Image: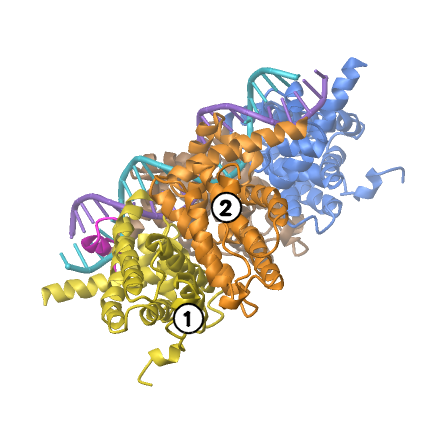
Chain colours: A orange, B yellow, C blue, D brown, E cyan, F purple
Amino acid sequence: MSSNTKNNKELLILRAAVRVFGQSGYHGSSIADIASEAGIATGTIYLYFKKKEELIIALFQRLIGDYLIAGRPRLEAMPAGFPRLQKLIAMHLEFFEGDHEVAAAFQVHLREANPEIREGIRPILVQYFEMIEHILLDGIEAKDFDPGLDVRLARKLVFGGLDEVVTSWVLSGHRYSLMNLADPLFELIARAVRGGAESRRHPVPRTDSLHGPA
Amino acid sequence: MSSNTKNNKELLILRAAVRVFGQSGYHGSSIADIASEAGIATGTIYLYFKKKEELIIALFQRLIGDYLIAGRPRLEAMPAGFPRLQKLIAMHLEFFEGDHEVAAAFQVHLREANPEIREGIRPILVQYFEMIEHILLDGIEAKDFDPGLDVRLARKLVFGGLDEVVTSWVLSGHRYSLMNLADPLFELIARAVRGGAESRRHPVPRTDSLHGPA
Amino acid sequence: MSSNTKNNKELLILRAAVRVFGQSGYHGSSIADIASEAGIATGTIYLYFKKKEELIIALFQRLIGDYLIAGRPRLEAMPAGFPRLQKLIAMHLEFFEGDHEVAAAFQVHLREANPEIREGIRPILVQYFEMIEHILLDGIEAKDFDPGLDVRLARKLVFGGLDEVVTSWVLSGHRYSLMNLADPLFELIARAVRGGAESRRHPVPRTDSLHGPA
Amino acid sequence: MSSNTKNNKELLILRAAVRVFGQSGYHGSSIADIASEAGIATGTIYLYFKKKEELIIALFQRLIGDYLIAGRPRLEAMPAGFPRLQKLIAMHLEFFEGDHEVAAAFQVHLREANPEIREGIRPILVQYFEMIEHILLDGIEAKDFDPGLDVRLARKLVFGGLDEVVTSWVLSGHRYSLMNLADPLFELIARAVRGGAESRRHPVPRTDSLHGPA
DNA sequence: TATGAATGAGCCTTCATTCAT
DNA sequence: GATGAATGAAGGCTCATTCAT
């Protein structure tokens, strides 16, 4: 119960931090802002986080951590290769579309100059990068993707593309549906990672399952 | 000459700002830091820039402006379609590899939460985005690219991919050559934007051909 | 037993406070530090002491109180005059050498600017001062000391000398034996308070004779 | 002129600091208090002193430094031995009586637990201690003082006695004249450091020169 | 134009103290 | 009595910006 209480308050603070950071950015937000958003006293935040930097690092850990924990099994349930890549893209966009505040906070702070924050965020991101690379590797093994594919580079294209799509959407004020871009983006990327025409075993399917009943 | 002097001092300040922002980030740098790097007095900066925000906005304007001014003719000298897309990718990577400080300053501050900065940078970026989209449109017209290509989306993939490649390189401490990634990245993106296999009119050339007369 | 329990806990806290104050000083120590040193909860301290200031005042009371209670009979067992003065000096140094933490806490906080603490400590110190003055007065009466001695002033020399000796020893990191200074210091002070050469009834004895039967 | 301006402002701040520290103590005073006492803005203090600790250290340096610079020649003008010792005592008391605020600030902060302050003050104090020890050594050589005198110990008695006299006077609210204690204190100390009766070459003189025309 | 001292608002962080359990 | 989470006032320090020279 004590641990539950602690987790609850911690979560309360992190939720407030997402909102405030998402709106004003890390440097534009004060601890007092976050406390007031959370409905608690300033000092209380320091019972759960030692420094302001820790807040945003914990935010990333929590967000990506939850995402990965929830996402990995769903991904691995898909056949390696195109289906799994498609799922990844859909999940990524779905995740951010599902929470505008998280998206805003995430996109803005992904690159932060403060070295402490940078170093705190890096290992979390790396996990995600590795997951993408594994999907690419498995796709090569499954003969869906070009056997000569530079996996590191392709990962950058995949992540960079996803990231830019989400960032544009955030900056546009969420004026359109992210999920609608999942299929077209997948098709683009799928063509990039697929080998020559002869390797086109899989037709590019729709992500219907995400859009409604098959 | 007065205007020349003014431009000189302004440039001096901006050059100092690139270095300082590139190293410590916008929020980690003070006006005093920049003045000292430029070898001038703090107050002098305010003779050329009204606010700190203006500095970084001017930085982006100058950087991308120069890049576009220098790059456009070189791009348009290439045939529309794959060659021009390849040139774009090469130029982008070449540009950042040529100046580590510019690269650092650019990558870190591309997404900045401060609304004033955000709004100041946006129109500049948009120019670049539009240039990319034009390359894509021209490539469709030239029958190199898929006629059904979603140009807005493809632009995001192209820019996102380039951006992620540069960011990774910056975060790695510039430990490898960016230019070496130009060809492989182009091949990936080229496959993405090309239509079906039947449209492959152009073989994928080497980038060396871009650097001088064959 | 309830009172006993209370006294025990109070003592536990004071003992922890000596250690913590001795190491970090009053202003460098938090109530939480003391509680943690005592192995109790922060709030518990407030069941025994209303304010942080009370802690250090109680500390002085306890320390000097115990010292006086234990010391007075031992002092009064000595003949008035030189022997008793010698005993005082020996006891003072012995007391602090016996407990480095007490010494550190005492020396540093003897002069504290906080008016509440100052006023709280003063009456306790005054007791000690009066005891010294009585020793001097008795010594005059016993014809050991100069009949024209300014007792108030001599008290300051005696206490100031003792205090400075202990402070130096504390600041040196207790690198030498305090007790070894008892005799030499006594000799100096004895000469100061003794009248002309003709009054030198007592030869200056060794301190060892004070520690048990010869 | 620039250096003069700087010194002036620095001095202004230090003077304000003496007053504020003297009244409320280091820990009871805020930088804002000092700034307001000096009639300047908070931030201005940081143009002259990097940290709050530096303020009090500079205070000691300035005070004791000035005292030593002014005092040394006056001391050395006196014949070694009793006259010089007498002069020292007179000067010490004279110095503090001359500036109640300095006295208050000095006495309270001589022993400060904060390690940075402690270490900053130490070398300054050591200078004073060494000066006293030299006076004692020279007095031995001059055959005024006991050749067997433990100079280190005697220094502690001299300084401790002076210090306690000043502290008592400060705590009493400066209710009496310090200078009136110079002669009696000298007499006490002189007897302490003088050897046996046979060494009493010098009669104990009055410090008349300080009190008026001989 | 150029300077750089001065300003003062603002923010992170600490910690004595309280209080519900 | 005992706990320790919560409070919120307070303070050190930074730094964008101004302005007298």
Label 2's element?
loop
- Which residue was labeled with disc 1? B182
The residue where tag 2 is placed is A207
Number of the front mark, 1 or 2: 2
Q: Is residue C141 visible?
A: no
Residue for point 44% across, 35% down: A19
Q: Where does residue C183 sit, x and y in percent of width and height?
A: 74, 45
- Residue B100 highlighted magenta (yes or no): no
* Whether labels 1 and 2 share one chain: no
Chain that bears disc 1:
B
Q: Which residues are magenta?
A: B39-51
For label 1, the crowd category at 10 Å Cα-Cα, with few meaning under 14, some 14 to 19 and many 20 or more, is many
Which residue is at 74% across, 27% downward? C12
Q: Of all residues shown, which one is farthest toward the front?
A: B198
Query: Which amino acid type corresponds to the residue marked 1 in the rendered image?
Result: Ala
Residue A23 visible in the shown view: yes
**Residue drawn at x 22%, y 53% as measured from the top left:** B49
**Residue contact between numbered discs 1 and 2, judged by CB atoms under 8 Å:** no
Query: CA gap, disc 1 to disc 2?
Result: 32 Å
Which chain is disc 2 placed on?
A
Q: Nearer the viewer, residue C65 or A106?
A: A106
Q: Residue B50 lies in magenta, yes or no?
A: yes
Relative to the observer, which residue lies in front, E1 or D45?
E1
Q: Position of residue A85 (x, y in %)?
A: 54, 53
| Type of the residue with mark 2 | Thr
Q: Please, is residue A85 above or below residue A212 in the view?
A: below
B4 sits to left or right of C31: left
Q: Quadrant of the N terminus of chain B?
A: bottom left
Image coords of residue A108 (percent x, y): 41, 46
